[in-house]
Amino acid sequence: MKSNAAANALVCLALLAVSACSSSSRVPNRDAGVTIAGIDGRVTLIRPGQDTNAAYSQGLDLKNQGNCPAAILKLRPVANAGPGYENAQTALGTCLLNIGAKNGELSADYLDGLTWLRRAADAGWPEAQGALATAHAFGPTAIRNGEEAAYWFALYQTNPNKSRVGFTPMAAADVDAVDKALTPAQKTAGEVRAAQWQRQVWLPPIQQPPAGPGAERELGGSGGFGGREQRRQAFPAASP
């Protein structure tokens, strides 16, 4: 009887040791990102991990300090997370515009910035809509377009999301400058287009499966995982 009891005690101790080692090697739930597999193998981020939140915060701090080159490195992976990260997309787009707007020429960085701003603006982010209005009103000659500026300006002006906590409005001087740059006809046309606006959320491209056992997944360029073509999800008409 005593030998059996001793053996059982040893087994219990061994099991406790294995359990402790196993639990210590796992990432705590509060630090881990949560994803689910969706249609066509798409991976959707439900809750970011600690690293994503840290990169987002650091990127915004760097942008506010005027260090856009460093901010872009932090913000791009966060912006690639897709829905829910429109603020990161807007900050990334703004930084790319600031870097790309040299000598009034339309650079690759500037075009990349417009792409990110458009993704956030299509999702209803007012700061991105205001930035696009300014870019099309006063940006490089190749993209100056009064009708396009009026469209985004109308969306910005009527966007109910400006009431959200943390909203950063356009500077009053910028609002006045865009307003004065547009003709009455352009404003009217922009308002008509804005009335037909529908929210469109940009979804990151589908994540490619690994090439083989132990293969690492590679992140694509500005589009996201795997470099596959992005798709947008359209929603029913709603106020911008």
Image: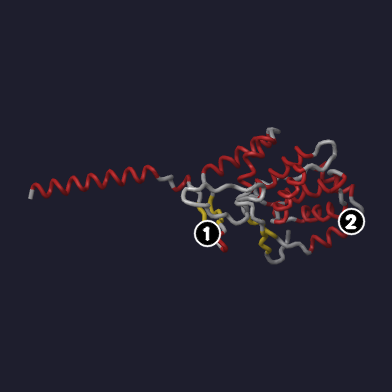
Q: Quadrant of residue 26?
A: top left
- Residue 176 located left or right of residue 38: right
Residue 186 numbered tag: 2
Residue 37 numbered tag: 1
* x 76%, y 48%: residue: 114
- Amino acid type of the residue tagged 1 in the rendering: Ala
Asked whether the beta carbons under mark 2 and mark 1 sit within 8 Å of each other, the answer is: no
Q: Horizontal and vertical percent for residue 205?
A: 62, 55
Q: Quadrant of the C terminus?
A: bottom right
* x 86%, y 47%: residue: 142
Q: Nearer the viewer, residue 8 or 59?
A: 8
Q: Nearer the viewer, residue 95 or 224?
A: 224
Give whichever of discs 2 and 1 has the lower sequence position: 1
Q: Horizontal and vertical percent for residue 72?
A: 67, 39
In this figure, which colouring scheme has been used for the structure?
secondary structure
- Residue 214 located left or right of residue 43: left
Residue 54 numbered tag: none
How many residues crowd mark 1 within 10 Å: few (<14), some (14–19), many (20+)? few
Between label 2 and label 1, give the one nearer the viewer: 1
Q: Secondary structure at mark 1?
A: strand
Q: Secondary structure at mark 2?
A: helix
How many residues crowd mark 2 within 10 Å: few (<14), some (14–19), many (20+)? some
As measured in the structure, the alpha-carbon distance from the residue carrying label 2 to the one carrying label 1 is 45 Å
Q: Horizontal and vertical percent for residue 12?
A: 22, 48
- Residue 30 located left or right of residue 167: left
Q: Horizontal and vertical percent for residue 148?
A: 84, 54
